[in-house]
Amino acid sequence: MRLTMVGTGYVGLVTGTCFANTGNDVTCLDLDRGKIERLASGQCPIYEPGLPELIRKNIDAGRLHFTADPRQAYEGADIIFICVGTPTGTNGRTDLGAIQQAADDIALVLLDRPRNAPVPVIVVKSTVPVGTTHMVRDRIRAKVGPDLAFTVANNPEFLKEGDAVSDFNRPDRVVIGVEDERTGEVFRDLYDPFVRNGHPIYVMDILSSEMVKYASNNFLATKISFINEMANLCEAFGANINRVREGMCADKRIGHQFLYPGLGYGGSCFPKDTLACVAMGEESGTPVDVSRAVHSTNQRQRERFFNKILSHYGGSLAGKRLAFWGMAFKPRTDDVREAPALTLVRMATAAGATASGFDPVAGDNAKAELGSLLELHGDMYQAASGADAVVISTDWDEFKSPDFARLASVMRTRVIFDGRNLYRRQHLGTLGFHYYSVGRATVTPKG
Ligand code: NAD
C-alpha cells in the first residue's frame, strides 16, 4: 500500500518506518525542512533505539521517502496518517491547529487530483479529543464538496518513547475506529504482520477509539500520582515505600507496572492528556475529578522534591552548585518535553544555585531549553565535579551503580537527592553520603 505520514516526529517517523519495513511504500511529510533534509540523507533526528538502522534499511530498499511538499506526499496515497502534535492550548484544551492545517492541505490536494485517482482513507493517529476525527472529515468535506467519496478513521498510537520500535512491531493491541466495516478490513490487512503474536486488533466506532487513548493514558497517569501520594504518606509516617510497593504489588489485581514513586510523570503525553480529559469534562458538563487531582498531585511532586533540596540548605541555595544527572523525561529517549529535571533546574537556579548537568543523550535538547541556566557536561563525574549535591532526575542505567568513591572524591560535599530511588539507603550512609530519596527516610552519613 502507499502510505503517507503527516508529521515526522516520534510517532510519524517510527510508524512510517515500521510500515515501510513490512513492505509498504511510505512517504513521511513534515513542514520542518531541516528535519526532512537530515532524514533524506539517512540521519535520524531523534534518539530511539533501533530506529536509525531501520530508516537506512528502508531508504536503501526504496520504500521510505521524505518530503516537505504536501502535494508530493498526498498525491496517490492509499492511506494518509495524520501524526502531528496536539499540544495543550489555552485553558487545558487541546490545540488542534496542526490537525486543522493538515486537513486543509489534504483537502487542497484532493480537490486537484486527477479523475480516477484513488481516494485515500484519512486516519487521525495523533491523540485527539473525542469528536476530532469527525471534525477533520467535516472540514475536508466542506472544501471538496459532497461528491468525493473519501473515508476517515481513527487509529490511536500506544508506543512508548525509548521502546517505540519494539512497541510498534509487537503492540499489546491495535485500536481502529471506522465508519464502515470495509475500512476496518483495510486496517486488518495493514496491521496483520504486527499481530502475528496473537495480540488483538479491535475495530470499533470512531468516538470510542478516540476515547480509548485518553482512558489509557489517564489511567496510567493515575497510577503514577497514586503511588507518589502513597510515597509521601510513607515519608510522613516513617514507612518505606519500597516495602509497601512489594507488599501491595504482589496482589495480582494490582501488579507491578507503573507503580514506581518518583518526581511525577513528564513527557509530551500524560501531562497534556490528563488536562485534555479535564477540558473535555468541562466542555460536556461531566466532572472528571480524578484526572484533575492526578494532574495537581503530579505538579506538586516536583515542588515537594525541590523543597527537600531547599530545606537541606536552610532555605537558600545561594552559592550552591547542584549537579543534575538525567535531563530526559525518562530513560532511553532524548525527549525533554515536560521533563522534571528542567523544572528542578529552573527552580534551583531561581533560588540562587548554579546547575551543571549530564544526560547520555538528551543533554543538547536540555541545553536548548535551559540556555545559560545549565552548564552541560559530556560525563557524569565531570558534571558532579565541585558540586555540593547530585540531583538524580532520570533513571538511566549508567546512574544505577556509579563509582561512589570516585563520585565522593570529585564532589565538594557528599549529598545526593535521588528522585528515582536508585540506591540502597544503608549503603549510601556507610559511604558517608547524605541521601534523600522518595517515600523513604533520609539517610545521614554514618560515623
Ligand atoms: P512531535 O512533536 O514529535 O512531531 C510532530 C511533527 O509534526 C513535527 O515534526 C512537526 O513539524 C510536524 N507537523 C506539524 N504540523 C504539520 C503539518 N501540518 N504537516 C506536516 N507536518 C506537520 O509529536 P509526537 O510526539 O510524534 O506526537 C504526535 C501525536 O502522537 C500527538 O498527538 C501525541 O500525543 C501522539 N502520541 C505521541 C506519543 C509519543 O510517545 N511521543 C505516543 C503516542 C501518541
Image (spheres, grey):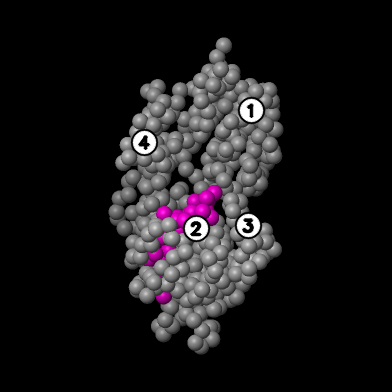
Mark 1–mark 3 Cα distance, whole angstroms, equals 33 Å
**Label placed on residue 61:** none
Mark 4 Cβ inside 8 Å of ligand 1: no
Q: In which image quadrant can residue 389 be found? A: top right
Q: Looking at numbered disc 1 in the image, what kind of residue is underneath it?
A: Asp
**Label placed on residue 403:** 1
Q: In the rendered view, does 26 fall on the left or right side of 122?
A: right
Q: Looking at numbered disc 3 in the image, what kind of residue is underneath it?
A: Glu
Q: Which residues are magenta?
A: 151-177
Q: Earlier in the sequence, mark 1 or mark 4?
A: 4
Q: Earlier in the sequence, mark 2 or mark 1?
A: 2
Judging from the image, what secondary structure is the residue with disc 2 in? helix
Q: Which residue is mark 3?
A: 53
Mark 3–mark 4 Cα distance, whole angstroms, equals 38 Å
Could you tell me which residue is drawn at 59 percent across and 18 percent down? 432
Q: Earlier in the sequence, mark 2 or mark 4?
A: 2
Q: Which residue is mark 2?
A: 169
Q: Which class describes the residues within 10 Å of circle 4: few (<14), some (14-19), or many (20+)?
A: some
Could you tell me which residue is drawn at 60 percent across and 69 percent down? 63
Regarding residue 19, the answer to whether it shows in the image is yes
Mark 3 Cβ inside 8 Å of ligand 1: no
Q: Which residue is mark 4?
A: 249
Specify the farthest residue to the left. Answer: 286
Q: In which image quadrant can residue 53 be found? A: bottom right
Q: Nearer the viewer, residue 297 or 8?
A: 8
Regarding residue 345, the answer to whether it shows in the image is no
In magenta stretch: residue 159? yes
